[in-house]
Amino acid sequence: MVSQLQQRNDYSFADYSNSCWLIDFASLDISIVDTNGSVIGRPYLTTAIDIYSQCCMGFFLSSKSPNYQAITQALRHAILLKRYDSEYNLRHEWRTYGIPVGLQINNSKLANSYLLQDKLAQLGIRIYYPKTGSGLNNSFTEKLFSELNRYLSSDFLSNQISTDNNSFLTLEVLEKILVLYFVDNFNQQIHNDSSHQTRQERWQAGLNSAAPKMIEENLLLTLLS
C-alpha cells in the first residue's frame, strides 16, 4: 500500500488527460426538499476534476456531509461512460471517462482511509499527497463552486425550477440541473491555457493513449461499493 502513496506539492506532473484527478467537496448554497416538500437542508457536492483539462469527470450529490462513500460514488460516475436520455435536454454529450493514474483528495482524513486506499490500489490508482505545509492548490475548485452557486441562485434557474417542478427542488431534480450545467456549460467553456479548445476538447486531445483505461462496469461497481 505504501508504494501507492506519493507526495506532490504541485500539479506539474498532470501533463495529460486522466493523469490525475482532484476530488473536492462543497456545500451548495441552495436548500433541497424531500418528495413531500419538507426541507432537508443544503446538499453536498463531490466533484472529480481532471487537472490537465479542467474537465469535470463526474460528481456525486448527497444530503449528507462528505464521507468515504461520496468519493467512491463520484469516482464510479467519473470512470464510467455516461449516457442520458432526452429528459435531460442536453445539447452535448458527456464524453469523458476512464481510470485515472492518480488522485488528490482535498480532505486529508478521507484520503487516509485504509479502505479507500485499498480499493484505489485494486484499480491501480495512486493517491498523491501534498508535501507537509504546502496545502492543496484548490483555487480552481473554489472558483468552480462559486460559479456554480451563482448559477443555482440565478433568477432564470429559479423560475425554471418553480415552473417545471412545482417549487420542489429535490435531489433528483438538482442532479438533472447539475448534469446540464457540467455537460452544456462548464465542460464547454474554453480552457484557460488553450484559447481554441473547450475543456472537453482538451481532455480528448490530451489522452496519452488511443483510449482511456477502463474496467468492466459490474466489477467497478463491486470494487467501489
Image: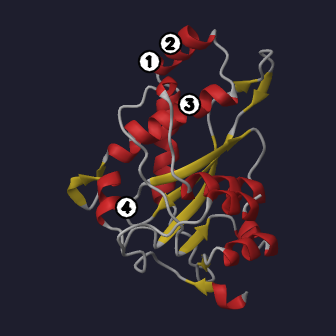
Seen in the image, is 141 located left or right of residue 222? left
Front of the two marks 4 and 1:
4
Q: Identify the residue at horizontal 51%, vertical 46% (top origin).
A: 82
**Element type where label 2 sits in the image:** helix
Disc on res. 13: none
Is residue 134 positioned above or below 94 on the image? below
Name the kind of residue labelled 3 in the image: Lys
Q: Mark 2 points at which residue?
A: 159
From the image, tell me which residue sits under label 4.
53
Precedes in sequence: disc 4 or disc 1: 4
Find residue 192 and report its image quarter: bottom left
At numbered mark 4, what does the secondary structure look like: helix, strand or loop? loop
**What's the residue at 49%, 70% (across, down)?**
213
Label 4 to label 3: alpha-carbon separation = 23 Å
Which residue is drawn at the image coordinates 26% and 62% (left, top)?
193
Tag 3 secondary structure? helix
Of tags 3 and 2, which is closer to the observer?
Answer: 3
Whole-Å distance between the Cαs marked 1 and 2? 5 Å
Q: Which amino acid does label 2 sit on?
A: Asn
133 or 138, which lies in front? 138
Which of pointers 1 and 3 indicates the residue nearer the eye? 3
- Residue 211 appears left or right of 125: left
The residue to which callout 3 is attached is 176
Residue closest to the eye, 208 or 182: 208
Labels 3 and 2: the sequence-earlier one: 2
Asked whether the beta carbons under mark 4 and mark 2 sit within 8 Å of each other, the answer is no
Return the x and y of residue 35 as percentages of the image width and height: 77, 19
Q: Name the residue under label 1.
A: 156
Amino acid at circle 4: Ser
* Quadrant housing the N terminus: bottom right
Q: Is residue 23 left or right of residue 52?
A: right
